[in-house]
């Protein structure tokens, strides 16, 4: 007999299989010897009271042989001689998972990626950290695997209505991820493990007859009768296909500008912008777990915060326990920071984006103040938020003094509008420079953040502290542009064989949701080619 049961255990108990088995015996009223084994279905923490508990959902095997968890299998077909070919622009999660699903339907994908493969890409990231040199085609955002490869691999999503989350997680396990992502409430792979997983996906695609081209940047396209005939690349190649999936990510500004120049409809999309906050991880552990020293069976503590300041939302974003702040600019002269964690989350710092919702009137006012309104056709300009995003990043670069040194303040000094005399040690390798962020950031961003920090200190006593450092700027939270598509066909309304997808097109907000959106487009193409 198999039976599902929920357990509430101390972390030390939940970390010991023999103690879980004893708990099952008690809960089921069965002898321990009758329980042949169990599988975890869901695992989460409950830290609301002073005693922290681990909640487990367990499938117990009683008086019958235990059967280990079955990982979903996938049939990848040989597409070498497929009559149909789809070009996928961008090898992030949307592009990769679209390619894998196309192969399962017998359709040949050709992925073109402006950046480098994961192994070679590491050298460019090292240069960013050590010398402040930004390669516009190979960085934390561009390259094989997309932005998620070297920025953490968080797999949590609320987008369960858009696709099959379990399928995406099982595919990650199929290519090398730990099985715990199948049952942890906030699954996480880690930047140290993702590159090998991404490489395994590419090897599967190529072994089935799909193609991968690196250092291949889309620079133009030709159309006829409302359809793309060929795309043009920076090295002079012209590539034809039956359909084109555009999965270029939230930072491919040149793609947005190319579409606008070609009079292909795009739309401004509101986004959030702010800073990254870094605390000692031990402090966050103490606050969240109500302890002096974290139990070794507990993971480094995380948090999620939101508050309304004068009717404007301020909220945490991409929280990284035991993490590192990294430079995420995609062009020289810009300062962008992001956060990531290794799989063990064992660094001494906790960092999180802390961002403010930006509306069209805010962005236009800031650009007008900077004398840049002549670039726009008003608050409805489709590139409005892109220009605003770039303006703030350039101002922060200047304030940092170059070489990707980031302008920063202690949290308490930030709220007082005071220059910090010294900054705490930080994980950010290029370095920090004390700078008046109240003058550098747009006023509505600064005031909202200052109010939010004080409110968060009341919600999490100890959070508002001079030991925390505020680092500018966290600006790549999502795409500042949406590329419209027909809700039924998923094609662009003006270009019948162009399929925008993923985070860059405005239809996803992370690795899993982008992967599901890539699969959704691939399924639609499979339907079309079957007709």
Image: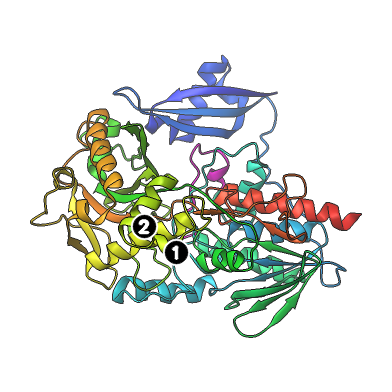
Q: Main secondary structure of the magenta part?
A: loop
Above/below status of 507 relative to 375? above
Query: Is residue 130 inside the magenta stretch?
Result: no
Mark 1 and mark 2 in contact? Answer it, CB < 8 Å: yes
The N terminus lies in quadrant: top right
Q: Residue under label 1, please give it.
A: 375
Which residue is at a point 67% across and 42% down the rendered structure image? 163
Q: Is residue 208 visible?
A: yes
Task: Identify the disc placed on residue 219.
Answer: none
Residue found at the far top of this picture? 29
Secondary structure at badge 2 equals: helix
Q: Is residue 405 visible?
A: no
* Residue stretch in magenta: 179-193
Residue found at the far bottom of this picture? 236
Res. 504 image quadrant = bottom right
Front residue (pair 325, 137): 137
């Amino acid at each position: 007999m198999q039976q599902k049961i929920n357990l509430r255990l101390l972390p030390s108990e939940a970390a010991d299989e023999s103690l879980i088995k004893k708990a099952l015996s008690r809960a089921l009223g069965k002898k321990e010897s009758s329980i042949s084994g169990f599988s975890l279905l869901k695992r989460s923490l409950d830290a609301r009271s002073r005693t922290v508990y681990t909640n487990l959902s367990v499938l117990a095997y009683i008086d019958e042989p235990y059967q280990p968890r079955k990982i979903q299998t996938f049939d990848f077909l040989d597409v070498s001689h497929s009559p149909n070919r789809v070009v996928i622009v961008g090898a992030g999660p949307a592009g990769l998972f679209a390619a894998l699903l196309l192969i399962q339907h017998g359709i040949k994908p050709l992925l073109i990626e402006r950046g480098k493969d994961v192994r070679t890409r590491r050298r460019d990231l090292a240069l960013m950290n050590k010398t402040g040199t930004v390669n516009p085609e190979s960085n934390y955002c561009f390259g094989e695997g997309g932005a998620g490869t070297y920025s953490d691999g968080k797999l949590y999503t609320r987008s369960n209505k858009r696709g099959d989350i379990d399928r995406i997680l099982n595919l990650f396990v199929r290519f090398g991820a730990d099985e715990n992502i199948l049952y942890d409430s906030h699954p996480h792979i880690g930047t140290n493990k993702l590159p090998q997983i991404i490489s395994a996906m590419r090897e599967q695609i190529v072994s089935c007859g799909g193609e991968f081209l690196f250092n291949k940047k889309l620079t133009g396209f030709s159309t006829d009768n409302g359809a793309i005939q060929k795309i043009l690349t920076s090295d002079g190649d012209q590539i034809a296909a039956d359909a084109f999936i555009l999965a270029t990510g939230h930072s491919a500004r040149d793609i947005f500008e190319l579409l606008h120049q070609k009079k292909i409809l795009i739309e401004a999309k509101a986004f959030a912008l702010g800073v990254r906050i870094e605390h000692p991880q031990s402090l966050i552990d103490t606050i969240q777990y109500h302890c002096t020293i974290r139990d070794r069976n507990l993971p480094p503590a995380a948090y999620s915060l939101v508050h309304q300041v004068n009717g404007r939302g301020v909220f945490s974003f991409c929280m990284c326990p035991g993490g590192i702040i990294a430079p995420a600019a995609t062009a020289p002269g810009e300062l962008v920071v992001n956060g990531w964690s290794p799989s063990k989350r064992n660094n001494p710092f906790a960092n999180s984006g802390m961002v403010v919702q930006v509306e069209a009137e805010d962005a236009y006012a800031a650009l007008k103040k900077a004398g840049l309104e002549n670039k726009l056709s008003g608050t409805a300009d489709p590139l409005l938020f892109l220009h605003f995003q770039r303006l703030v990043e350039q101002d922060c670069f200047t304030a940092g003094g170059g070489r990707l040194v980031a302008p920063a303040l202690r949290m308490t000094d930030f709220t007082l509008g005071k220059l910090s005399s010294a900054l705490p040690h930080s994980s950010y390798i290029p370095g920090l420079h004390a700078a008046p962020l109240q003058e550098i950031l747009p006023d509505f961003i600064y005031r909202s953040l200052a109010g939010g920090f004080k409110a968060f200190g009341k919600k999490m006593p100890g959070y508002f502290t001079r030991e925390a450092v505020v680092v500018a700027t966290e600006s790549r939270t999502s795409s500042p542009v949406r590329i419209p598509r027909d809700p039924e066909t998923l094609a662009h309304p003006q270009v019948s064989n162009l399929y925008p997808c993923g985070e860059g097109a405005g239809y996803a907000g992370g690795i899993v949701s982008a992967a599901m959106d890539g699969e959704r487009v691939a399924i639609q193409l499979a339907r079309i080619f079957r007709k």
